[in-house]
Amino acid sequence: MKARKPGPLATRTPSLDTKTVARFWSKVAIGHESECWLWTGAKKDTGYGAFRVGNATCTASRYAYAAKHGPIDPQMHVLHSCDNPPCCNPEHLKLGTVADNSTDKVKRGRHCHGSKRPLAKLTNEQVMAIAKLWATGALSQKEIATRFGVNQSQVSRLLNRKRWRHVDVGAPKTGHCNRGTRGSIYPMEKQ
């Protein structure tokens, strides 16, 4: 027996028949048109509602948008203007691309970066401490890396602002600290 390939939760829009739409809206706490209408049914770990019809499941916000506007292109995402994952108010929802969704996530600070990443080995405070240690000139990148339990290349990327750019370490966002003046995290000026 051939296993069926499951589609991503976000791209499926199940049946929009009257009975299913009525069942969907019965799981939404509908309020004033400007308020968030919260999904009261099952939710994913991320807080987004999950609506199941037969063998298909989609996010509640996607179904809410489709119930008001019709079927959605599978390549499109439904974005929240309210930044409230369980919200199903169609006035708070709009279509966007993967890039739009990523940009929106970064603007709202919901993207996974720095110490929020599950495999992060450093905290924001440790990143600031590394920059301060490097600025003193007392330790090499390798010595700093050993002290913090990471490798030298990670320290270099941090000091060159290729990683951990969201942490203010008092240095420009770009530069080449390992070619600049020893002890400084500021880049050497181009000649």
Image: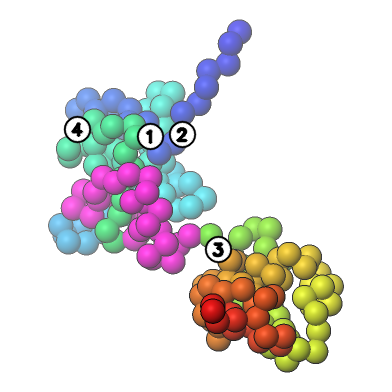
Q: How many angstroms separate mark 1 from mark 3 (CA)?
A: 25 Å
Classify 161 as above or below 12.
below
Residue depicted at x 59% and y 80%: 187
User: Of discs 1 and 3, which sits in the foreground?
Assistant: 3
Which of the two discs, 1 and 4, labels the residue nearer the N terminus?
1
Classify 133 as above or below 94.
below
| Residue that label 3 marks | 113
Which of the two discs, 2 and 4, labels the residue nearer the N terminus?
2
Secondary structure category for the residue under label 3: loop
Classify 191 as above or below 71.
below
- Front one among 89 and 70: 70
Which of the two discs, 2 and 3, labels the residue nearer the N terminus?
2
| Residue that label 2 marks | 8
Task: State if disc 1 and disc 2 touch (CB < 8 Å).
Answer: yes
Which of the two discs, 1 and 3, labels the residue nearer the N terminus?
1
| Residue that label 1 marks | 11
Residue depicted at x 32% and y 44%: 97
Q: Amino acid at mark 3?
A: His
Mark number displayed over residue 70:
4
Secondary structure category for the residue under label 2: loop
Residue depicted at x 68% and y 58%: 119
- Is any atom of residue 16 visible in this view? yes
Q: Amino acid at mark 1?
A: Thr
**Where, quadrant-wise, is the C terminus in this rendering?**
bottom right
Q: How many angstroms separate mark 2 from mark 4 (CA)?
A: 19 Å
Q: How many angstroms separate mark 1 from mark 4 (CA)?
A: 14 Å
